[in-house]
Image (cartoon, rainbow, N blue to C red):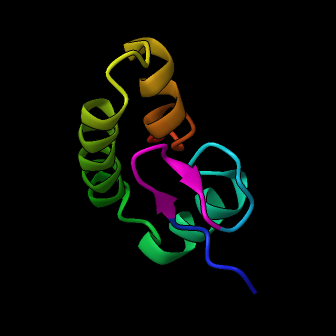
Amino acid sequence: MPEHLPRSPTWTCTGCGRDWPCATKQSQLLAEFGGARAALAVYLGSCLVAAAEDLPTLPLPSARQRFLGWLPRARI
């Protein structure tokens, strides 16, 4: 099975070629981090910063959605 890792500097997935994190990697990350949503958000935030450095023309709203927008919200 291919690993779904980010390919720098394009931030495409090494496993499927889609924008990273692809849907497969999103599922993997949710399983890896379990209920630790804050830790996952911190990890993805650091990925967002690295991607912003590699892709300076990437619009911030779409970058935020791509890296953080898919995270489950906390239940209140």
Across and down, in percent, residue 42 comes to 24, 50
Evaluate whether residue 13 shows in this view: yes
Please identify the quarter of the rendering in which residue 70 is found.
top right
Q: Which residues are magenta?
A: 6-14
Q: Position of residue 28 (x, y in %)?
A: 60, 70
Of 20 and 70, which appears nearest the observer? 20
Which residue appears at 51% of the width and 26% of the height?
Answer: 65
Going by the image, does 35 lie left or right of 46?
right
For residue 68, side relative to residue 21 (left or right): left
In the figure, is residue 72 to the left or right of 56?
Answer: right
Residue visible at 26% across and 43% down?
50
* Above or below: residue 43 compared with residue 52: below
Q: Nearer the viewer, residue 69 or 22?
A: 22
Q: Quadrant of residue 45?
A: top left
Q: Is residue 26 above or below residue 61?
A: below
Q: Quadrant of the C terminus?
A: top left
Question: Residue 34 at x, y = what percent?
Answer: 47, 72
- Would residue 23 be counted in the magenta stretch? no
Locate the N terminus by quadrant.
bottom right
